[in-house]
Image (cartoon, grey):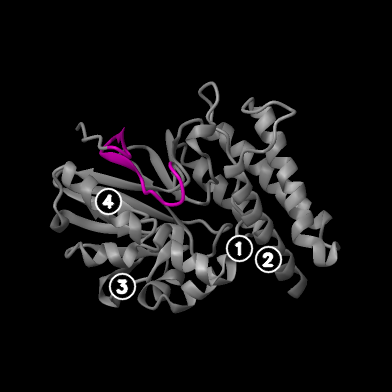
Amino acid sequence: MTLSNLEHSTDQGHGIIALDSGYGREQHVAVHLMIEGSRAAIIDTAHNASVPRVMQALAANGISAEQVDWVILTHVHLDHAGGAGQLMSQLPNARLTVHPRGARHMIDPTALFAGTVAVYGDTAARQLYGEIIPVPAERIIETPEGARIDLAGRTLRFLETPGHARHHVCIHDERSASVFTGDTFGVSYREHDHQGQALIFPTTSPTQFDPEQMHRSIDRILALSPNSVFLTHFSRVDDVDRLGLDLHRLVDAHAQIAIDCSNAGSDRVKTIEQQLGQLFRDECVRHGMIEACDPLPQELQVDVELNAAGLDSWLQARARH
């Protein structure tokens, strides 16, 4: 099946379309459409402003709103799930899948939005996400470890994959021999590909980073021997084994930086951020993307800051136990 390539979308084969959601900057957050026969599923939703692009992409591929069976969330962080309620309001037959820990936040997103405000501040959070619309409880299907759903005869299986978030799942699609990994398998932006190879980093953003769990989750993905992994940030990577080794190494490096900075007092987050910035820059040089004298690309500085805040949260959690 050859799918229509609109602006902002790319046919990835096997009925999968990668759609640039328009969140933040180009090729930052992907929404993936899966079309099987005359039925469709949507994997992660980005924010409310992404919904028109999703609906346009469906229509361009001959899929009506009534033909969408599933909206699938890897986890409920708002760059992945902020548009879920608004999207569901336009898809009369769709059901929403989410980890059991995340279901209540889709039914009543008040606490979820408050957590986002704590990270970004109230003004920025409202500018980014607008009003988070609840999803009726009767339209939600909880997908714990081992759950399966059917898309016109195509089976999607859910793996519980904590490490980035305790309510995170990945979705294994045997038809395409691929896994949709949300944030568990890190971030890899296509503008940073160099000589056909991807650059990858773990995402340790607040507040549930756990390095041991992240290692186990990465290994679960690798054990499936996927041909491709589809990241929300940003879409398809193919050199999965190499990238998995890089992720394992970098998860350990992140944790060690946090531990080394644990006694830095009131300057701890800034100190972690400085050391992470150097780690990211060294990786960019190693990858061949920048020269040794070049600064870190500005778009990666956002990930450095979020990862530093998440590492600080991890240190606080360790200190409480």
Residue type, label 1: Pro
Identify the residue under disc 4. Answer: 54
- What's the mark number on residue 206? 1
Q: CA distance from mark 4 to mark 2?
A: 34 Å
Residue type, label 3: Val
Is disc 2 surrounded by few (<14), some (14 to 19) or many (20+) residues within 10 Å? many
Q: Residue at x 60, y 64 (%)?
A: 208
Q: Which stretch is magenta?
A: 7-26
Where is residue 225? Give x, y as percent: 47, 36
* Label located before the other in sequence (4 or 2): 4
As helix, strand or loop, the secondary structure at mark 2 comes to helix
Between 141 and 121, the one nearer to me in the picture = 121
Q: Is residue 207 left or right of residue 66?
A: right
Residue type, label 4: Val
Where is residue 276? Give x, y as percent: 72, 47
Q: Is residue 79 left or right of residue 148?
A: right
Residue type, label 2: Ser
User: Is residue 32 shown above or below 96?
Assistant: above
Q: Residue at x 57, y 43 (%)?
A: 299
For marks 4 and 2, give the one nearer the viewer: 4
Identify the residue under disc 2. Answer: 313
Between 251 and 207, the one nearer to me in the picture = 207
* Label located before the other in sequence (3 or 1): 3
Residue 34 placement: quadrant: top left
Identify the residue under disc 3. Answer: 135
Question: Does 9 appear in magenta?
Answer: yes
Q: Residue at x 27, y 51 (%)?
A: 54
